[in-house]
Image (cartoon, rainbow, N blue to C red):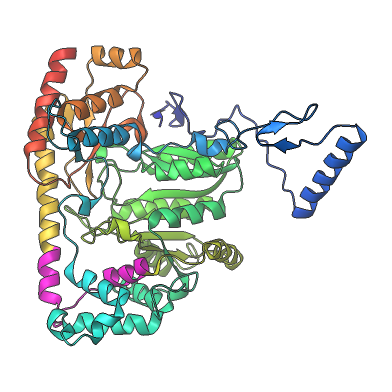
Amino acid sequence: MRSFSKTSSSATVLTSPLATPFYSPSQGYAPAVSLSSSSIRLVSSVAAAVSSSAGMPSPTHFNGTSSPGTVPFRRKAITLDTMNQHLRCADYAVRGRLAIRAEELRKQLSNGDMSLPFDEIVNANIANPQAMDQKPITFFRQVLSLVQYPQLMDNEFAAKIFPRDALERARILLNEIGSTGAYSQSQGVPYIRKSISKFIEARDGFSADPNAIYLAGGTSSAVSSLLTTICSGPETGVVIPVPHYPLYSAVLTIANASPIPYLLDETTDWGTDIKYIASVLEKSLSNGVDIKAMVVINPCNPTGSCLSRDEIKDIITLAAEYTFMIIADEVYQANIYRGEFHSFKKVLRELQRDFPGEFDDVELASLHSTSKGMVGECGQRGGYMELVGIDERVLEQLYKLVSISLCPAVSGQVLTELMVNPPKPGDESYTVYKAEYDEIYGALKDRAFSLFNAFKEMDGVSCQEPKGAMYLFPTISMPQKAIEEARRRNEEPDQFYCLGLLEKTGVCVVPGSGFGQKDGTYHFRATFLAPGDDHLRRIIAFHKKFLEKYS
């Protein structure tokens, strides 16, 4: 990932090179030529005719060799140089070098290696709640087990093992689905889309159309489908926050589109400066970029910040003025520890109500997932997107795209239904559900502030107070000697710091350079999912020794 700075004219500039190819005014565009299948056959026929008329022999391969005078045998058709180079350029730091090294160290520990200065690996690099100590919600797993194995409901002991509402929900879902082993509609099970629409209506106070909802195999799948649909080449610009979850820059790189960065303001709790964002848009447009969308992550990954209603209103106003889609990543909407969550859909509907005609054409995609919140079912791959204000002809193409994958996993769809339609007061399972939900929420909030307080003890480290999501993103004042040593090793300084932390403590975090950051600043992202405080003491001790060594 790259570092960024604001120039005096408020334009964002790239200040250090790396893999992801952001748009550059100095680079011209070379749009790809679109070939139909008939064109490809014609090209192949012409090539064969030219080869034949020139007396060029066709390659004939026998047991890995070539006949004399033929084209040299190629042992591998797909190599690092012949594969999709856009994929090769994509970067995803969350599971990058540090995560790989953490797994190597974990294997050493499991093999009985006693030479390491720690006895466990703490994966604070990724929000994977149930890989820590978070337990599944009982009602969700009860219904999932019944839906996956319906014969359980025929057992004479079923009523003693499962609560009545779990049995009833499973019967309803099975009646609508048929079997979790069968394909659903490409857009998702209609009944489940109706449940999601009711959840959105209850949350926002405005109607939601089940036909505007697409189930997905987690938010990552939804993002990939969206960006594949809207990106048409390097002239396509998608405005993304810095720092940001690297899924977006990775998918844009693979799509051969142009990420347009806008810096979040660390001095205002990682807030948005709407005048600055407008200047980024103006500069990009003047350079010939076709801005198709703007990504907003709220609550934010990696910073943990939450947007105010006024900030959301300003972004929607920009979208109406400059005509771009808003992609609102709202997967952490239940993880709010200070303040209030405002959905983009609700604020948009309020603006459309209060200012008739001004915001009617705003395009919005809102994303939610079963992986976060108090659900934490990352491995089940459930989620959805709601699309508002999108051209019907574009929706037809998006439907075609998701149909190519047939459907999202039906078990993930079931879990999504349970997330948006949990037990309610008066239901048999409600008391247990509410206790489990509150316990998970309380533990996450306590751990967030424990990590925050640990960072407050560390010299040269500053961090915003936790507001939401599952992360903190502290700034490190890196000693000059440490920066020089990192450069000598051809590493980013924050990666150098994070690798040292891993090797000395077993705590794996992600360097800020993996998310993008302002030039000359250094950060790392840490989840606060790990139980206990022993790993916090190890982080504090490492940091003290690091400063002593390099100051």
Above or below, 350 relative to 81: below
Above or below, 429 relative to 241: below
Q: Residue furthest front?
A: 63
Q: Is residue 117 visible?
A: yes
User: Residue 384 sits in which quadrant?
Assistant: bottom left
The boundaries of the magenta stretch are 411-437
Q: Position of residue 298 (x, y in %)?
A: 31, 52
Q: Position of residue 13 (x, y in %)?
A: 46, 28
Name the foreground residue: 526 vs 329.
526
Dominant SS of magenta comes to helix
Looking at the image, which residue is at 17% across and 47% down? Answer: 529
Q: Position of residue 431 (x, y in %)?
A: 10, 74
Name the foreground residue: 170 vs 335.
170
Asked whether 459 falls inside the magenta stretch, the response is no
Looking at the image, which residue is at 54% across and 52% down? Answer: 228
Looking at the image, which residue is at 22% across and 16% down? Answer: 479
Q: Residue furthest right?
A: 53
Name the foreground residue: 317 vs 214.
214
User: Residue 140 sits in which quadrant?
Assistant: bottom left
Q: Position of residue 474 (x, y in %)?
A: 21, 34
Q: Name the image quarter holding the N terminus.
A: top left
Q: Is residue 551 visible?
A: no
